[in-house]
Image (cartoon, rainbow, N blue to C red):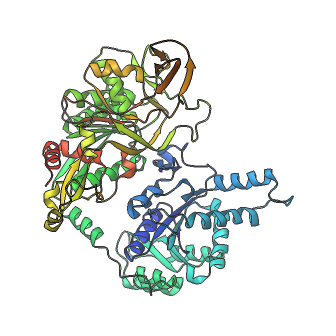
Amino acid sequence: MKYVLVTGGVVSGLGKGVTASSVGVVLKACGLRVTSIKIDPYLNTDAGTMSPFEHGEVFVLDDGGEVDLDLGNYERFLDVRLTKNNNITTGKIYQSVLEKERKGDYLGKTVQVVPHITDAIKNWIESVAVIPVDGKEGPADVCVIELGGDIESMPFIEALRQLSFSVGPDNFCLIHVSLIPVLGVVGEQKTKPTQHSVRELRALGLTPHLLACRSAQPLLENTKEKLSQFCHVPNQNAHHSILKQLNLLSIAAPPNLQAWTKRAETYDNLKNSVRIAMVGKYVGLADSYLSVVKALLHACIACSLKPSIDWIAASDLEDESAKLTPKDHAAAWETLRNAECVLVPGGFGDRGVGGMILAAKYARENNIPYLGICLGMQISVIEFARSVLGLKRANSNEFDSETPNPVVIFMPEGSRTHMGSTMRLGSRRTLFQTPDCVTSKLYGDYFYIPVDQSGGSYGHKVIIPPFGAAFCPATCRQLVDLRYRNAEYVDERHRHRYEVNPEAIGVLEEAGLKFVGKDETGKRMEVGFLSIRIKLCILELYSLSVVCHVTKLDLKFFCFLRYPQILELPSHPFYVGVQFHPEFKSRPGRPSALFLGLILAATKQLEAYLNTHQNGC
């Protein structure tokens, strides 16, 4: 295994995550298989309980891991699926060591940072690095490691120093990200902070092989030469230097970055934009909704548009804000009215909920395309129950535990005493209940049948450009009978403690709100048998619908737990709420279906798009 370590110096926030992701992209473009690890030296076990204002968004993985947002960058850049173990924290390391100590695995020895903590770090890195994350068998060629933190990262630095020695110089490359400030008075690029940062790193036993320098202006040649001379790094092509250091020049191909280059050029040449109102709780820090922003970018580029995101603090829309901060209130409503679509993302707590409800109501009543994610879906249900059904006190148990109309309830399997890793987390399957609903159509895919076999079996999915099969190469259409099918299910990632009350579905659907996607059934209660003479019995037990069916003397009862996951308002151009987080699986060149639908609806192209796909080539 080859390792590339990315560290940072001088100041925080220089972009180590983007650098690590970019290095991975270049190595992958050279034909190498790449995996990633992020080291966060905080004592938290994971990022699940951290404030978005302090740490940015919590990214959720397929296995339910709540991790640092940089792992989202890795997944988007490298198109891989990481695991919770790809995010190493001090909390995880110390927890594993203490568990071993309690079991007596250290044979009575004094447990210390060196060697026990450092050994645990090395073992963790080496074991995770060989786990395939790209859907192929066998380990990757290169593992890119990003080291975060400051003084608390010292045990990790020592462990990485030992790792570099044990794997040998041909298997370890260190890239140091640093700042080159430009003094406003003379406009000169200063290298001294980087020199000092490299010197400190060397004192800890790690010597950088490359420098990734951030500056307000492109580095001048004399600046590069000075850095090369005083920091002992080569002044040459980056990918060539990495491959040379890792002794991969003989097996790596020239980097093929045509797809990325085309995406960048396409974005730079875009002229038109679409205005998106983002109504949320944490709009003071854009990183709080980083994956949502990226998903909107992917969808907009697919529609040849630039995203123009208008951030609206949900609390500014509330009536109370009109009294306390009238200017902010007026500006928020003006922004909302000028938007072409509305998006309400996830969140926790009751702050700003009133403003989100008003935003959902405005979008519903004025036929403005609306997408509600997680909390945003629950908000749309609360608003509909209040405005359409007349249940003025309809609410979520999260915001009002005494509400007489709990349209959103606490999940039975959740914990009320522990916050960390007690939600519904990770990839879950949602089954479409209505085959021809908009969401099912958006999640659909093309498949092909060989032309010389009538009714042949389905082949692989065919990746189709966003505006239909007509853009496929002619050779593709000649060789296959290309058809489109609506999705029967979708696998998306969840992160929530509350969801729509199943007991409220009937009355909501009678009023026009349709729940077109529900979770899998029969997983939470096994089949049981009773000896009793009865024909049919329907029991309502809490939120469980138990249907009892008699066969002779044996009563078979099955539990149908169908928790709603997707809602639509058929009378609306695009009014969709989902309990899961589709943004986590959006990729450059392969946008999330729901985000694509939102942008298409905002630009009056959704109907044409769906018709094109339904009609095939």
| Position of 368 relative to 23 (above/below) | above
Q: Could you say where residue 153 lies in the image, as x and y percent from the top left?
A: 63, 62
Residue drawn 41% across the image and 42% down it:
429
Q: Say if residue 154 shows up in the picture.
A: no
Residue drawn 56% across the image and 66% down it:
129
Residue drawn 54% across the image and 30% down it:
526
Q: Could you say where residue 513 lies in the image, as x and y percent from the top left?
A: 28, 25
Is 302 left, or right, of 140 in this rendering? left
Report the residue that reaches farthest toward the right.
Answer: 108
The one of 101 and 69 positioned closer to us in this rendering: 101
| Position of 363 relative to 157 (above/below) | above
Q: Could you say where residue 544 lies in the image, as x and y percent from the top left?
A: 47, 22
Is 202 left, or right, of 67 in this rendering? right
Quarter of the image where the N terminus is located = bottom right
| Position of 262 relative to 591 (above/below) | below
Q: Which quadrant of the view contains residue 604?
A: top left
Q: Could you say where residue 193 lies in the image, as x and y percent from the top left?
A: 52, 73
Quarter of the image where the C terminus is located = bottom left
| Position of 382 relative to 86 (above/below) | above
Q: Say if residue 453 shows up in the picture.
A: yes
The one of 538 and 176 positioned closer to us in this rendering: 538
Report the residue that reaches farthest toward the front.
Answer: 552
Q: How many marks?
A: 0
The one of 76 and 284 positioned closer to us in this rendering: 76
